[in-house]
Image (tube, helix red, strand yellow):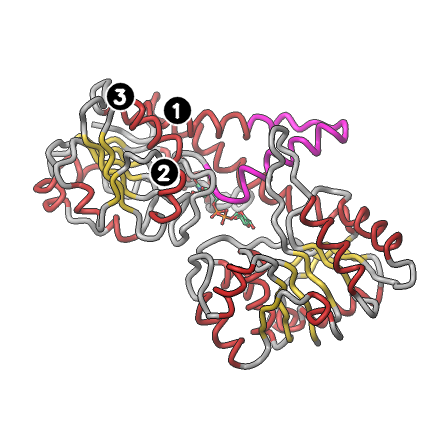
């Protein structure tokens, strides 16, 4: 079986490499010449553990290739996956579908035989149906079926998520197209992965509902953390206490500075708009969006309060800039409003992130100083702030930190340190949702 992947971004690249690993022949179409050249040279445009090796192995086996030549990539293809970006449209929060429709139209014009057109990008409910209409208009001579196959992979563990997913969701209404997708996902059938076959609209809504529900869990535990701080409770015990209830589940109950990344902020906003437009507004999702925005914007105030009310002239070491560990992605990272506010208030910021500093440079104020290690960032700092929970920060020796820093304030926005140990080492430790001191 040959398939085509339109778009060599996060979802497209990971999916293509993993499909190739399943034994399918995959041609990735990448329109950006710079990105294409990098991919052909074996260099990944993103940092994702294991991706470079997986791509290299499948390119070597001849199952994975990168091209700008759409007609060639469509030759003998059985399915065309559209994995182009769907950024938030400026101003209104709706997903911008111009890339998706442009890709669908180009594919329709270039196809020489019928194929299944599959959306992998997260697209608003109704998009698959609109693509079907477009195909019927542009190529009434070809009977192309449309399917929706949303991707649930997480950055940082994308390959494992793809190869061993909890489930696969496929919206498809045509019997032959369903068979094509069943063939492509055959290796997952063999490991008994549940596959939810449904209609187009349901698959599209399922993707938004999944992300919105997880985002809601995070927003919920963050509110409980605030409440725990006010009442003397410990939010980790609350999370464990509720999470052990199988109906709730333990995952996604870790408090922090608010969710970021390429999906949760964009998808909650888009779902909010979809629901409003459909005449069934979701007050819950609207609250999640508002609560999370306010949380990220308010995080700097916590740091300033921990520093005695002002950071003017103080040096703040910032550990972690990316929206989560094991990625170089800075999109909607809580670090953006936090660092900007600290600089705006007159602090000197010395930052370190194991992967994200290059991306960060373009987005953060130019005054930020980038350091080669966590300890270098901590040198002479009045306060140290953990924004992203990279594993290497957990292993920092408190004695070394105490020696290196000038001040004693630690604001741990991910609760990676043990509060008692930190207090024992003489730090004024501030975590999230548990006793400070
Ligand atoms: C998410 C979904 O998990 C994935 O299924 C979807 O395909 C894309 O969006 P990702 O954005 O890579 O994946 O990251 P994820 O691990 O889900 O974290 C999202 C955000 O929530 C991060 O900012 C993270 O720090 C935050 N988070 C997550 C918490 O603050 N607490 C938690 O307990 C979990």
Please check the rendered image and state whether residue 268 is part of the magenta-colored stretch, yes or no.
yes
Label 1 to label 2, Cα distance in Å?
Answer: 21 Å
Q: Which residue is mark 3?
A: 305
**Quadrant of the frame with the C terminus:** top left
Q: Position of residue 93 (x, y in %)?
A: 62, 32
* Residue 423, image quadrant: top left
Q: Nearer the viewer, residue 110 or 153?
A: 110
Query: Ligand 1: does it lie within 8 Å of the C-beta at label 2?
Result: no
Q: Nearer the viewer, mark 1 or mark 2?
A: 1
Q: Is 105 on the left or on the right of 242, as rendered?
A: right
Residue appearing at x 53%, y 25% in the figure = 290
Residue farthest top in this picture: 309
Is 46 in front, or is 72? 72
**Circle 2: element type:** helix
Asked if the stretch drawn in magenta spans residue 84, the answer is no
Q: Which residues are magenta?
A: 259-287
Of the image marks 1 and 2, the number of the one nearer the N terminus: 2
Q: Secondary structure at mark 1?
A: helix
Q: Residue furthest front?
A: 33
Category of crowding for the residue at label 3, using alpha-carbon neighbours closer than 10 angstroms: few (below 14), some (14–19), many (at least 20): few
Choose the circle earlier in sequence order: 1 or 3. 1
Residue to which mark 1 is pinned: 298
User: Which callout, 2 or 3, points to the residue nearer the camera?
Assistant: 3
Residue drawn 56% across and 26% down?
A: 287
> Residue at the spot x=83%, y=67% of the render?
114
Q: Which mark is residue 236?
A: 2
Dot 1 crowding, Cα within 10 Å, few <14, some 14–19, many 20+: some
Q: Is residue 167 above or below residue 222?
A: below
State the CA–CA distance, disc 1 to disc 3.
11 Å
Q: Tag 3's secondary structure?
A: helix
Left or right, residue 143 beside residue 256: right
Q: Position of residue 312 (x, y in %)?
A: 21, 22
């Amino acid at each position: 079986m040959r398939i085509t992947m339109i778009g060599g971004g996060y979802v497209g690249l990971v999916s293509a490499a993993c499909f190739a690993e399943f034994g399918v022949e995959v041609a990735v179409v990448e329109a950006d010449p710079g990105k294409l050249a990098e991919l052909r040279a074996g260099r990944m445009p993103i940092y994702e553990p294991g991706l470079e090796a997986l791509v290299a192995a499948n390119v070597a086996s001849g199952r994975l290739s990168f091209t700008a030549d759409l007609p060639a990539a469509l030759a003998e293809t059985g399915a065309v996956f559209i994995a182009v970006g769907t950024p938030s449209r400026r101003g209104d929060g709706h997903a911008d579908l111009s890339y998706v429709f442009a890709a669908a139209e180009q594919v329709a014009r270039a196809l020489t035989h019928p194929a299944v057109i599959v959306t992998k990008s997260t697209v608003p409910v109704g998009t698959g149906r609109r693509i079907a209409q477009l195909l019927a208009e542009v190529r009434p001579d070809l009977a192309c079926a449309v399917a929706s196959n949303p991707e649930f992979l997480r950055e940082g563990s994308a390959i494992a998520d793809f190869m061993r997913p909890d489930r696969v969701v496929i919206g498809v209404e045509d019997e032959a197209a369903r068979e094509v997708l069943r063939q492509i996902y055959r290796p997952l059938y063999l490991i008994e992965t549940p596959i939810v076959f449904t209609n187009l609209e349901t698959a599209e809504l399922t993707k938004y509902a999944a992300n919105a529900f997880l985002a809601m869990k995070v927003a919920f535990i963050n509110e409980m953390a605030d409440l725990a701080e006010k009442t003397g409770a410990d939010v980790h015990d609350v999370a464990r206490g509720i999470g052990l209830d199988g109906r709730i589940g333990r995952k996604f109950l870790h408090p922090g500075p608010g969710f970021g990344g390429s999906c949760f902020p964009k998808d909650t906003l888009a779902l909010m708009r979809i629901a409003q437009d459909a005449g069934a507004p979701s007050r819950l999702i609207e609250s999640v969006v508002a609560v999370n925005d306010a949380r990220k914007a308010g995080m700097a105030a916590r740091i300033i309060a921990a520093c005695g009310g002002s950071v003017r002239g103080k040096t703040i070491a910032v550990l972690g800039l990316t929206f989560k560990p094991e990625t170089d992605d800075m999109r909607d990272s809580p670090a953006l409003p936090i660092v900007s506010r600290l600089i705006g208030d007159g602090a000197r910021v010395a930052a370190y992130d194991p992967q994200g500093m290059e991306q960060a440079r373009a987005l953060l104020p130019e005054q930020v100083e980038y350091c080669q290690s966590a300890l270098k960032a901590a040198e002479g700092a009045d306060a140290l702030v953990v924004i992203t929970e990279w594993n290497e920060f957990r292993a920092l020796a408190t004695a070394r930190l105490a020696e290196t820093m000038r001040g004693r304030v630690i604001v741990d926005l991910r609760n990676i340190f043990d509060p008692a140990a930190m207090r024992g080492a003489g730090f004024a430790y501030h975590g999230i949702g548990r006793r400070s001191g």
